[in-house]
Image: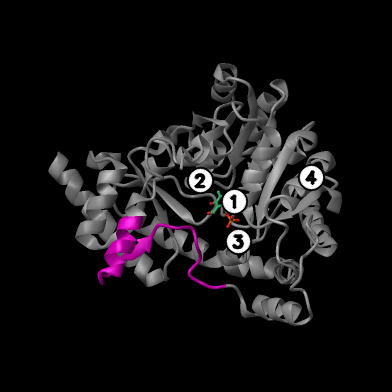
Amino acid sequence: MQLSHRITHLLGDGDDGWGVFYRARAMKAAGRDVVELTIGEHDIRTDPVILEAMHAAARAGHTGYASIPGIPALRDAVAARVQAQSGVPTTRANVQIMPGGQAALFAAHHATGDPGDSALYVEPAYVTYPGVLRALGLVPCPVAADPEDGFQPRAADLAAAVRAAHRPRSLLINSPNNPTGGVYDAATLDGIARVVRDHDLWLISDEVYDTQVWEGAHLSPRALPGMAERTLVIGSMSKSHAMTGSRVGWVVGPEAAVARLADLATHTTYGVPGFVQEAALFALAQGDALEVQVAAPFLRRRALALDLLARQNIVRVQPPQGAMYLMLDIRATGMTGEDFALALLETHGIAVMPGESFGAAAAGHLRVAMTVADEVFVGALARLLEFAAEQAARAA
Ligand code: PLP
């Protein structure tokens, strides 16, 4: 039987960008020692106090169908958090609880574009973005941000891409950024907001790394003039509270849009388990301390990495301003990110993501997730740098 074009072409014509990751997993399954610096998941697990709260909630009976927009107390807590961060008045009517940021991205694009419409996003981009758009029949329109600009998109490039697109409806941005570690500054966000307003687009602002900012400050574009009515913010407990497996996140946006998202949830996910929502509520009530604790290993490893990188001059790095990744520029080796990553995996058993997995804008780069114990991380990075020096010497 024939399947739909939307599902069979979800990955586009290429692969899904996870080739090195799958190869690393296959090598591990075959018994080889592999250091995985690939996926964006903490090496710690969800804090036991959150698990206790989840267990207690389940025992207390929160195991039936839960309120589909989200339990009121959690929507209130998310609204209060978003209002405190951004200064934008926010109530529970602006919040739809979702089973994770990924589902929130899907729902936000479902709500803002029809099949055949164009959806813009900034590259390098989180690997699932184009697939989300294709799954909805939207036309993915990447806009490259240059390494030389610290991977911050230029307003002029965005405006040109909007003008070139067929029925453009939305622009998706992500700050703090996966994979680049960039945090958009006020000038970049002003430029983005101007383009979005001038062209009457929705802005979908993926802010799932908002608690991992190492330099500068996290600014939400929803707070800019005229933006609250056209911005959908994607949030998640995954990165902030090491709750990746709990699948709980949200969309924050205008009331009318959020009401439609509840309709969509009624016909797709049917909500998020009540005991998971209660655990998220408990976790948010712990305040900043827990978030700082969850983020601390990445800040520590960032310092260790920058120290190692400063001792050589082959591999270049823009110090990540946020998130849990290093974006390394390996163009001095003369290799593509893909060839380098595959060779590093085969020869040293170290798995990193080729920049190309995140779009052409990151060609000649590697994304290194800082998600293993400090000593393992430092050892692997040191070997990566030695390998890069060997390749560069060979190329010279
Ligand atoms: N957005 C970005 C930029 C991400 O890196 C991820 C996960 O890695 C997600 C969204 C989805 O996160 P989740 O569905 O776990 O909330």
Give whichever of discs 4 and 1 has the lower sequence position. 1
**Magenta residue span:** 22-45
Give whichever of discs 3 and 4 has the lower sequence position. 3
Q: Is residue 351 left or right of residue 247?
A: left
The C terminus appears in which quarter of the rendering? Answer: top left
**Amino acid residing under circle 2:** Thr
Q: Residue at x 32, y 53 (%)?
A: 20
Q: Give me the C-alpha separation between circle 2 and circle 1.
A: 8 Å
Q: Which residue is mark 4?
A: 258
Which quadrant of the view contains residue 232? top right
Q: Secondary structure at mark 4?
A: helix
Q: Residues within 10 Å of mark 1 (few under 14, many from 20)?
A: many
Q: Give me the C-alpha separation between circle 1 and circle 3.
A: 10 Å
Expressed as whole percent of the image width and height from the top left, the position of residue 358 reads: 43, 42
Q: Residue at x 36, y 56 (%)?
A: 21
Relative to 199, say whether 214 is above or below.
below
**Amino acid residing under circle 3:** Ser
Expressed as whole percent of the image width and height from the top left, the position of residue 208 reads: 62, 52
**Which mark, by number, is residue 128?**
2
Q: Secondary structure at mark 3?
A: loop
Q: Nearer the viewer, residue 246 or 385?
A: 246
Expressed as whole percent of the image width and height from the top left, the position of residue 364 reads: 32, 39
